[in-house]
């Protein structure tokens, strides 16, 4: 046995031993309270191939889940491209983010929360500009009426359309490629006509975004890249 693991014994657990890879690539074993350690070791050895594969996968994903540090050289997304950051503090200049010459410039004191706030307000401003433009474009093309547009800080939900046709989009949407943004915009706009995900709804989407399935898959596969 050369695999390290953390063992959690539980009286509630009846029969099975189960395993999980934690956020820091540590192996967690959950076992019924009275399981002999020899049995647990045997279980871990049997699962070795699975564990190795899961650990490798976790290690690949780790940098993506990593929280931003807002330091020079770190990359930030804008319309589907990653651009490097230059971070510094010039107290006599305005605090905040400027995007110039394919680079982000952040003027902010050494405080992660403040830096994060600077980026969020920059992203929100850009998201509002760009999304209003795309919403207006599709609204006139599709002859729809909406009640308003809101930019949110939602982490999981890219967009939504309320009962009374208020549109909301996460500011994170401004980080993804333009064709993916268009899919999300059209998706939410079509909810003005159909408040569900029926085949009738998807037929409306496909008329405007023929490759919507590819855009939807892209979002699902890449959503972890856009944490701040
Ligand atoms: Zn929907």
Image (cartoon, helix red, strand yellow):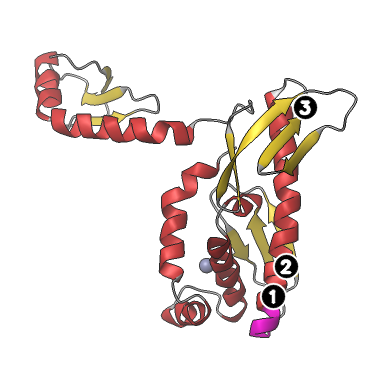
Q: Which stretch is magenta?
A: 139-143
Tell me if mark 2 has few (under 14), some (14-19) or many (20+) residues whose alpha carbon lies within 10 angstroms of its own.
few
Residue 178 visible at all = yes
Which of the 4 image quarters holds residue 159?
bottom right
Instruction: Judge from the rendering whether residue 198 lies leftward or rightward of residue 176; answer left or right.
Output: left
Rendered image: mark on residue 14:
none
Asked if the residue at tag 2 contacts the one at tag 1, i.e. Cβ–Cβ closer than 8 Å, the answer is: yes
Instruction: Name the side, left or right, on which 97 lies relative to 210.
Output: right
Q: Which residue is mark 2?
A: 133
The label shown at residue 108 is: 3
Q: Residue 7: x, y in percent?
A: 26, 18
Q: Which residue appears at 49% of the width and 79% of the height?
A: 201
User: Which image quadrant: the C terminus?
Assistant: top right
Q: Alpha-carbon distance for marks 3 and 1?
A: 36 Å
Q: Position of residue 166 (x, y in %)?
A: 70, 68
Q: Secondary structure at mark 3?
A: loop
- The residue that label 1 is drawn on is 137
Q: Is residue 26 above or below residue 94?
A: above
When asked about the image quadrant of residue 220, the answer is bottom left
Of the residues under marks 2 and 3, which one precedes in the sequence?
3
């Amino acid at each position: 046995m050369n695999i390290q693991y953390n063992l959690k014994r539980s009286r509630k657990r009846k029969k099975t031993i189960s395993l999980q890879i934690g956020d820091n690539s540590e192996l967690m074993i959950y076992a019924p309270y009275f399981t002999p350690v020899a049995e647990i070791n045997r279980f871990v050895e049997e699962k070795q191939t699975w564990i190795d594969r899961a650990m490798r996968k976790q290690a690949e994903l780790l940098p993506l889940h990593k929280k931003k540090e807002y330091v020079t050289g770190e990359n930030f997304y804008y319309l589907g491209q990653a651009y490097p950051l230059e971070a510094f503090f010039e107290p006599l200049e305005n605090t905040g983010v400027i995007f110039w010459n394919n680079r982000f410039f952040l003027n902010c004191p050494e405080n992660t929360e403040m830096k994060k706030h600077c980026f969020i307000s920059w992203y929100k401003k850009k998201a509002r500009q760009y999304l209003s433009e795309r919403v207006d474009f599709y609204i006139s093309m599709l002859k729809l009426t909406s009640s308003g547009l809101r930019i949110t800080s939602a982490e999981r939900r890219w967009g939504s359309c309320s009962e009374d046709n208020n549109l909301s989009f996460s500011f994170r949407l401004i980080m993804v490629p333009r064709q993916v943004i268009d899919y999300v915009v059209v998706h939410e706009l079509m909810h003005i006509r159909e408040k569900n995900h029926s085949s009738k709804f998807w037929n409306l989407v496909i008329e405007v975004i023929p490759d919507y399935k590819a855009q939807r898959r892209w979002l699902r596969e890449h959503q972890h890249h856009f944490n701040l």
